[in-house]
Amino acid sequence: MSLLVAIASRVGRTLLLMLLASAGTVFLVRLAPGFFSDAREMDARYARSVQMELAAERGGDQSAIGISLAEAKSWLHGDFGQSREYHVPVVELIGGRLRVTALLLIKGIVSGWLLALWVAFPVSGLRRGGTLWGAPFTILLAMPTAAMATACILSEAGGPVLVLTMVIAAREFKFLRSLLVEAWRAPHLVQGRAQGMRPWALARVHILPNIAPRLSALAALSIVTALGALVPIEAIFSVPGVGQLAWSAVMNRDLPVLAAVSLLMAFVVGLTSLMTAGTPAWEGA
């Protein structure tokens, strides 16, 4: 029974997160200056009668609550409404871009973890100089994602996968190094090293099994980190994914698209929270 209650609680928090994210998006966009503006109204070729027709298109309840109810109805219909910018169902816009974004996320997260593990293992075993070897990751952690992407474009080296890899590796290296340092200092590890056991054998037999639960939680949190970096990466590199679509929707106040993307992001974050159970990944970091 306690397991069912825990699962129901996590699912309830996920649904509440999705509801708050969608409602917050609607209220913020609705209250933003220029929400009712239309680029066609600035065109002198449109006569007064046409401008009146444009105003009629925006008729109906334009309050935040009214817009929220209209968005909810579109979600129930399954099309998530019609894009204000592209004039097609939102589900078609997002559906065609999900694969591009998913591949970028998978490549960036996997590559970032491999890089962080590859450096964290030897650095965590050092008695001196660990801070110096970890300095590049500290510098990367302090750099905005957009700055890294712009540097890649200006230098004509790297791409979106490289930037996302750097973002993930910079964040996870700190936690991985802390976990591994703690593991290396365990009494049975000290004894094993004194007896001449190889570091890889110690890691495979003793370290990895012990830190595996916290590694799984940390890996799930990497998804949240990657989602936060997704929009600037796809916007700067012109990757035709969900992040670029969200940026375009922000610039054009495309509320149906923004609400759908916010709902999707909240669902992914909620699903990630369902995956993270047990000891927090940052404990001891």
Image: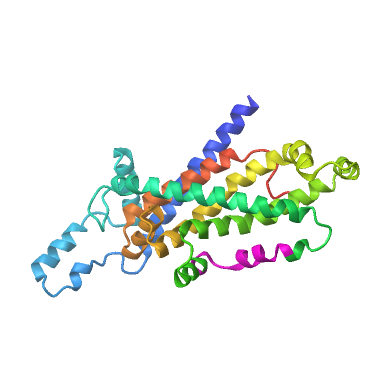
Residue 142 occupies quadrant? bottom right
Magenta-highlighted stretch: main secondary structure?
helix
> Does residue 252 sit above or below 282 in this rendering?
below
Residue at 26%, 67% in the rendered image: 37
Q: Where is residue 259 in the image (x, y as percent from the top left)?
A: 37, 52
Q: In the figure, is residue 226 to the left or right of 241?
A: right
Residue closer to the observer: 161 or 257: 161
Residue ranking furthest to the top: 1
Q: Position of residue 14 (x, y in %)?
A: 51, 41
What span is colored magenta in the figure?
A: 133-147
Report whether residue 285 is seen: no
> Does residue 226 sit above or below 279 in this rendering?
below
> Does residue 40 sit above or below 228 in this rendering?
below
Residue at 66%, 50% in the rendered image: 117
Q: Position of residue 29 (x, y in %)?
A: 37, 61
Quarter the N terminus occupies:
top right
Q: Position of residue 20 (x, y in %)?
A: 47, 49
Residue 38 occupies quadrant? bottom left
Q: In the figure, is residue 181 to the left or right of 20?
A: right
